[in-house]
Image: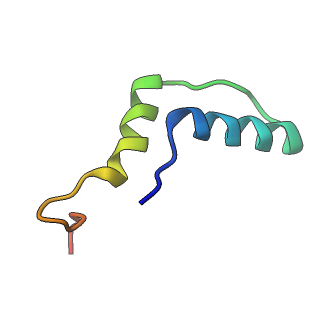
Amino acid sequence: MNYLSAEDVLVIHARIIGETGGAHGVRDTHLLGSIVERPKMQFGGKIPNCF
């Protein structure tokens, strides 16, 4: 499975901001790192969720 990296997310963000306007930058780089790692978390080959 392919996952987005933090750098990928920043590039996508910059392109969207460039086309639609808004503020560049990231408020919390540690949170961004956590967000991009979350889809990789699995237990027993299954992705955990609340259901």
Instruction: Tell me where residue 39 appears, x and y as whole percent.
Output: 36, 54
Q: From the viewer's side, name the closer residue of 39 and 51.
A: 39
Task: Point out residue 10 in the picture as x, y percentages from the top left corner.
Answer: 63, 34
Left/right placement of residue 39 relative to residue 28 reads left
Q: Residue at x 78, y 44 (%)?
A: 16
Where is residue 13, by image quadrant?
top right
Residue at 60 percent across and 39 percent down: it is 8
Q: Residue at x 88, y 43 (%)?
A: 19
Residue 25 appears in which quarter of the rendering? top right
Q: Is residue 6 left or right of residue 36?
A: right
| Colouring mode (rainbow / by chain / secondary structure / one colour) | rainbow
Tell me if residue 43 comes above or below residue 33 in the rendering. Answer: below
Farthest-out residue, bottom: 51
Q: Is residue 3 left or right of residue 41?
A: right
- How many marks the image carries: the answer is 0
Query: If the image is split into quadrants, where does the C terminus sit?
Result: bottom left
- Up-down relation of residue 21 to residue 51 (above or below): above
Please report the residue visible at 14 percent of the width from the left and 60 percent of the height from the top.
Answer: 43
Is residue 29 shown above or below 33?
Answer: above
Residue 46 coordinates in the image, percent (x, y): 20, 68
Quarter of the N terminus within the rendering: bottom left
Q: Residue at the left extreme?
A: 44
Residue 24: x and y in percent read 72, 26
**Is residue 20 rendered to the left or right of residue 42?**
right
